[in-house]
Every structure is written in C-alpha cells, then in structure tokens.
Amino acid sequence: MGAEKRLIEDLQWAGLHWDEGPGVGRSNQSYRQSERNDIYRKHAQGLLATGAAYRCFCTPQASGQGKAAHVTSGCYQDCSSLSQEHSLSKVNDKQQASTIRLKRAIDVKDRIYPDLVHGKIKPLKRKFTDVASEDGEAGIDAADTVLMKSDGTPTYHFANVVDDHLMEITHVIRGAEWMASTPLHYDLYSAFGWQPPHFAHVGLLLDQNKAKLSKRNGNLALDVRSMREQHGVLPETLVNFLALLGWSNPWRNDVYDLDGLAKNFDLKFTKGNSIVNLDKLWYLQKQHVAQKSQRAKQTGDLEPIHPLVDAIANEVRERWPALSNSDRFEDDEELWKFCSDVLLADSKSYQNAKHFVDGHRYLFAYNEEEVPIMPDVLEVKGGGELRKVEKRALQLIAQEVLQHDIKTLGSLSFQPVVIKVLLESLDARDRDSIDYADIPDSPEMIEDGHFIALCKSLVPGIEKRLTESEFQGLALDKRAYQAAFTKYLRNQLSYGLSGPSIGSVMALLGYEECSRRLGVTS
C-alpha cells in the first residue's frame, strides 16, 4: 500500500490526471489487480464457453539428464481435446488442479500485429523449451499460453488485456521490451472479439555509457520523490524532460508545459534507444523557472515563483541563521522579499535552491577571502586590440562614481548602468522601483568628454589639445576601460562569479554595501 500511495502522489504532483482509476470513475470498483479476481474469472469462463480457451490438467514434468535436462510445463496430454463437460466434471470432482489456457487459433499464422513505431511485430519463433508455463511468462507468444493459474489468479498478460478493455484504453505506449508480448495480447483481443488498442513500443532508456539506466545516475537519484525533494526538480520540468525522450519533436522549441505538450505531442518516436542526458533536465529547469519569473515580472504577481522563493529563503536561513534578524533584514518577510528580487534578477541560472544560493552567496554574506586577487595591470580588448588598464585607475573611477552625491550625479557625463542604478535607488531597502529589464548587461559607462578628462587626471602630461590619432587611441582605451571596469566591479562585488548584470548586483547590494566592498569612503 505504501508503494501504491507513493505512486499516486507522484503522478498527482506531476500534474497528471487520469480519466479512470483510483479516486476517479466507478466508485464501487477496485483497481487493484488482486481484488479483481472475480472479473478475470468471469472473462476466462467466457473464453471457455466460446472454445477460445480450455482447461489443462497437466503438471510440470522433468525429463532428460545433464545438459539435456529440461522441464516440460506445457500441455502434453492434449487437454484441449477434452469436452467441456468432461473438463468441468474433473474440476467439480476435485480430482486435480487445472489451469486455463488460450487455444491456438487456426488463422494465427496469417495474423498481422501492427505497431505505430515499428510497423509490424513478428512473433518469436518457438523452441522446444518455449512451452508456456503456469506463470504465463515463458513463451509468451506461444500457443496454449496460461491465462488463469491453478490457484484461480490471472497471469499478468490476461489481466492486462481485460483491464485495458474495461477501461476503454485506446493507445498502449510502453517500452520495447514488451514487444514480445504484443502478439499474445492481440490474440487475446481477437479471442474475445474486442477491438484492440493501438500499440506503440518506444526504445529503452540508457545512460551516457549506453548501459541500461539505473535508479541512480551519478549524484542524482532517479526516483520521482528524490528528484523533487532532494534535487528540487519542478513537476513541469520532469514531465517536459520525460516527454522528449525518444520523441521526434517536429518543432524547434523543446520547452513545454503540460498544456503545450497536449497540443503539440504526437506518436512519432525514434525506433532506437534513448540516451538520458541530465544536462537537458537542468536546461529545461532553468527555462521553466525563467518563464515563471517573466510572468511574475509582467503581472507583478509573485504567486508563480512563490514555492521557488520559499525554497531559496529556507536554504538561506539554514546557511546563515542570523541573517533574517540583522542589520540588513529586520525579519523573515524582508529576507523573503530580497530572495524574490534575487530570483527575478537572475532566474535563468536557477537549477535548485541549494545550487542557486551557493552561486549567489555574495548577495547574502560577504567573505573577503573569496575575492580574487586582481593584477595591478589588466590586459583587456578595446576595439579588437589588447589594451592595458591599471587597477589603480579602476579604483579611482569607482571612487569618482560612488563619492558623488546621488542627487547631483545625473549632471555628470556618466552613462547608464551605475548612474541608472544610483538614481533609481541603489538603496537595497527601496529596490521595488528598479526595473531589472532596463539595466543593460554591458555598461556604457563613460562619455567621451568626461573619459578624456579622467584620462588626463590619471596620465601625467596630457594637457595639450589631442590629435586625431590620440583621440582614436583614447576611444579604444575607453572601450577597454568599460570592459575592465565591469570586470573590476564583478570581481570586488561578486567574487568574479557569473550571475545577473553588474547593475543588478549593485542594486541588490545597495549603495553602502557597494561602497564598503569597493573600499570607497563617503
């Protein structure tokens, strides 16, 4: 019962809803195979009545010696020739136990077993030892397959066909390992006079080494509960990922929610096995989180990202317990709001809460030991050429920017990112007004006029009127300084880690924290 409950919970978590089954459909009917024996017996009796099946009283017999030894578990006494009255009397007299076997149809050799993926399925050729046993698993394509065991319970194949028919299943999509069973299933539908469903057999799932996929792949447990609870995989991510395995997706887009899959999915599968690439899982995870975050930005409603922010906030509190009652955050609510801002600023890097918090740890706490040591002179490209920029110059630019009063800063000839961030409230306590989408990823920091003046103050001897070649050289230097300054800010503010634009980082950290990390005193 525990496994059954977990399976139902996993399907419901994934957003999958069935038309008939536990909790849906016929309330007075059980869907557990062990509680449906009366149904299977009734249908087996129906096959006996039409002559499509017969009772068999044979018991397994051992014969041969050494390597030639084998067990004959099929019908070796020609029980199918017994009249129904004779068979029934043997059962009623309890002379011996019996099974119920499917009688081989006369036209079975002429039958076609279609498959939506593979075209036609050929029945396996029988060997001497392929006689169907009472468990119904050996020789599943063989004639005289056991349908009901001697204890009155059905074999899997018989129960499978009866259940699918009663629940009006139209398509059976399953792994290629079940192809060998398909001729038997078709024969059972024919014996009952039922219309068979469409069958589609998809390839097996293999790991990167082309071995059968195990329950654990690297550090990732592949059961649903572990993926959602330990690794933070979203339901839409997992459904999207699984739907793409083996599917010949005709569209360029691979990112679908359940509604999108329902509209676009078809039964065009590849015939071969599928390699499970978990990098694709995390790619889809990031795309789904980005879509949720985009909806939250557009509508102002944080409901789509609420569970994600909860997970981030919980991870932050676990890592820095005192943070929600500190100088930066007065309470959990303020910390939660900050976590939502961080997610909206860099949603495309979200894999799971633990991974996200670790990659953005510089926004929650500052460890000076993690700041990479920069060389005194940086070599960066300016207009395709390598230019040298002194770290001292970058420190002076940072000082120039952050020491000016915010109200008068707009009169200077600096351009977008730093100025925009400062003017629209660099203060981390009032970041609601910041539109992250408007902050450029590559800052155009300084206009030519002010840049030249700044260069004159940094490079002794530049007081004369500039020649055209000197001006062009300074223009190249300007590009180099822009690239170097962005690199310097990211190095000092965020340990040089990739993440949101440097303008967003500054907006999230706030004016005072930026000044502290850059060593600028007011």
Image (tube, grey):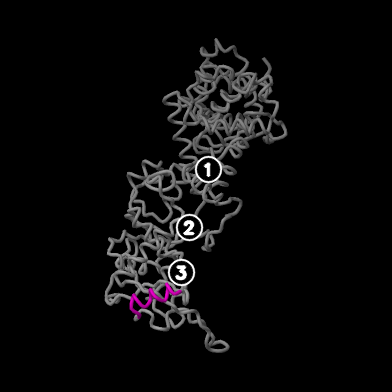
Q: How many marks?
A: 3
Secondary structure mostly seen in magenta is helix
Taking the image as shown, residue 236 lies to the left or right of residue 481, namely left
Q: Amino acid at mark 2?
A: Ser
Q: Amino acid at mark 1?
A: Val
Which residues, given as a range, are shown in magenta?
82-93
User: Is 293 or 361 nearer to us in this picture?
Assistant: 293
The reply to whether the magenta stretch includes residue 84 is yes
Taking the image as shown, residue 219 lies to the left or right of residue 367, namely left
Q: At which x and y percent is residue 424?
A: 51, 17
User: Is 34 or 340 nearer to us in this picture?
Assistant: 34
Q: Residue furthest bottom?
A: 65
Q: Quadrant of residue 405?
A: top right
Above/below status of 517 relative to 382: above
For label 3, the residue is 149
Above/below status of 461 relative to 250: above
For label 2, the residue is 34
Q: At which x and y percent is residue 461?
A: 62, 22
The reply to whether the magenta stretch includes residue 315 is no
Above/below status of 285 relative to 309: below
User: Is 113 or 296 nearer to us in this picture?
Assistant: 113
- SS category of the residue bearing label 3: loop
Q: Nearer the viewer, mark 3 or mark 1?
A: 3
For label 1, the residue is 233
First-in-chain label (2 vs 1): 2
